[in-house]
Image: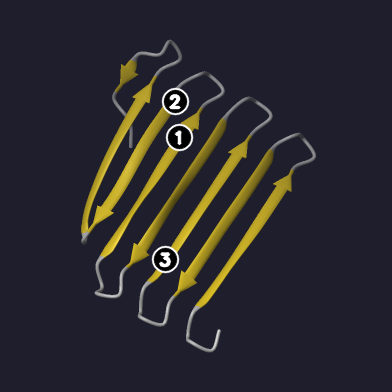
């Protein structure tokens, strides 16, 4: 607009001939006072049963502080899974993640 504010969004689905699919959505904004932010999500699923998804947002305030978070999950065709969360608050980043095997037992996450 004429005040210096702007925003936009987009979405992009896709599917493969073998049955796999993916989608992505995102939006962003910028305000005249210098604040800005972005949020988005994405997911994918394979024909073998594996799937993954992620979503999150991040915002910068007019005073420059940054805050946001992202959640991610993935499940393999064998039933193993990962659940993770990353958070940023005033420049400090923290992450937690949990992995489970096919029987639901918590196991060490491998890099």
Disc nearer the start of the sequence (1/3): 3
- Residue at (46%, 21%) from the top-left corner? 80
> Is 106 positioned to the left or the right of 37 in the image?
left
Q: Quadrant of the N terminus?
A: bottom right
Q: Nearer the viewer, residue 106 or 59?
A: 59
Residue 32 image point, x, y percent: 41, 82
> Badge 2: how crowded within 10 Å, few (<14), some, or many (20+)?
many
The image quadrant of residue 66 is: bottom left
Disc nearer the start of the sequence (3/2): 3
- Answer whether labels 1 and 3 touch (C-beta < 8 Å): no
Residue 16 image point, x, y percent: 75, 42
Residue 48 image point, x, y percent: 65, 25
Q: Is residue 16 above or below residue 9?
A: above
- Residue at (80%, 40%) from the top-left corner? 17
Residue annotated with mark 2: 81
User: What is the secondary structure assignment of the residue under circle 2?
Assistant: strand
User: What is the secondary structure assignment of the residue under circle 3?
Assistant: strand
- Residue at (62%, 25%) from the top-left corner? 49
- Answer whether labels 2 and 1 touch (C-beta < 8 Å): yes
Residue annotated with mark 3: 37
Using the numbered discs, state the Cα–Cα distance from disc 2 to disc 1 in whole angstroms. 7 Å
Q: Quadrant of the C terminus?
A: top left
């Amino acid at each position: 607009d004429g005040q210096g504010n702007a925003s936009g969004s987009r979405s992009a689905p896709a599917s493969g001939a073998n049955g796999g699919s993916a989608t992505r959505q995102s939006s962003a904004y910028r305000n005249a006072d210098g604040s800005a932010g972005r949020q988005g999500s994405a997911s994918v699923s394979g024909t073998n049963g594996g799937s993954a998804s992620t979503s999150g947002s991040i915002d910068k305030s007019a005073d420059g502080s940054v805050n946001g978070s992202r959640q991610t999950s993935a499940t393999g065709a064998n039933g193993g899974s990962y659940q993770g969360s990353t958070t940023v608050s005033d420049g400090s980043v923290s992450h937690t993640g949990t992995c489970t095997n096919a029987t639901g037992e918590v196991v060490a996450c491998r890099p």
